[in-house]
Amino acid sequence: MQNGFLINGPDHAEFTVLLAHGAGGAMDSPSMTAAAEALAAIGFRVARFEFAYMAARRTSEGRKPPPRADKLIAEYGAAIERLGVRSPLIIGGKSMGGRVASMAADDLFAKGKMAGLICLGYPFHPPGKPEELRTKHLETLTTPALIVQGTRDVFGTRHEVQSYKMSNKIELVWLEDGDHDLTPRKKISGFSLADHLASMAGAVKTWASSLAP
């Protein structure tokens, strides 16, 4: 732990990736750890942090529900300032963490504070409520973005998402039979979680290579 961050990967990587957690899983959850390790394995420096409500769950304050996503934008910005990276910065996160980053992205990008956005399992809508879309700001996004999504993610399947209007700055990568943690059913898909994590990391590396320095 360094100044509230979990760090993976080389200190002098070409890119640093800042990741925030989902609504219910901490920064050291198995899915967050697996994603960070996969990205670090191919040369990214990855920093994970927690929003205050999640950090409070580790103390005597007990379990706190997550605030609305827009209430966490300032915390994300504060984490960027605290991290203080000099190399090009990519922001993002898993599920809600990626959503918060996407809501902050255009302002940060315009100010030159980050180079791009990645979302791992974007929560396009609550499970079972496809009419409650969380995509309005994605229609006009000006920040280069990559969304990596499992095709059977209950927060947005490939069948659902292909009908959404989204900015041409967003690239979508689909992982066959992946769920919200990108986990496939190997007997059905032929893919393992390790396969999908490697594909995710490779997609991020290819996409990041196209970002302006």
Image (cartoon, rainbow, N blue to C red):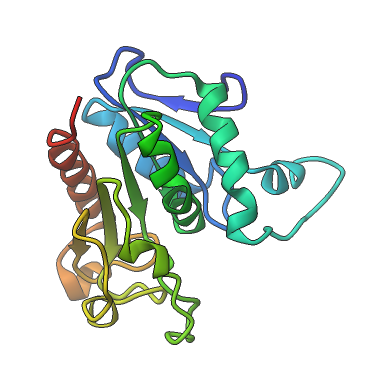
In the image, is 87 to the left or to the right of 66?
Answer: left
Q: How many marks?
A: 0
Left or right of 144, for residue 203: left
Q: From the image, which quarter does the C terminus lie in?
A: top left
Q: In the shown orientation, is residue 159 left or right of residue 49?
A: left
Q: Residue at x 42, y 19 (%)?
A: 85
Q: In this picture, is 200 found above or below 151?
A: above
Note whether 117 is above or below 211 in the view shown.
below
Question: Which residue is situated farthest in the right direction here?
Answer: 60
Residue at the image position 18 percent from the left and 37 percent from the top: 205
**Residue drawn at point x = 33 percent, y = 44 percent:** 117
Quadrant housing residue 211: top left
Relative to 81, residue 156 above or below: below
Identify which residue, 164 or 121, lies in the foreground.
Answer: 164
Q: Is residue 66 visible?
A: yes
Q: Could you say where residue 204 lies in the image, as x and y percent from the top left?
A: 21, 42
Residue 40 drawn at (x, y percent): 31, 29
Report the front residue among 187 and 98.
98
Q: The N terminus lies in which quarter of the figure?
A: top right
Q: Is residue 94 above or below residue 107?
A: below
Question: Quick check: can you spot residue 24?
Answer: no
Give the quarter of the image for residue 209. Answer: top left
**Residue 182 image offset from top left, x and y in percent:** 32, 60
Asked whether 117 or 189 is in front, the reply is 117
Question: Quadrant of residue 181 in the image?
Answer: bottom left
User: Which residue lies at the image location 49% right of the left edge and 19% below the top edge?
Assistant: 84
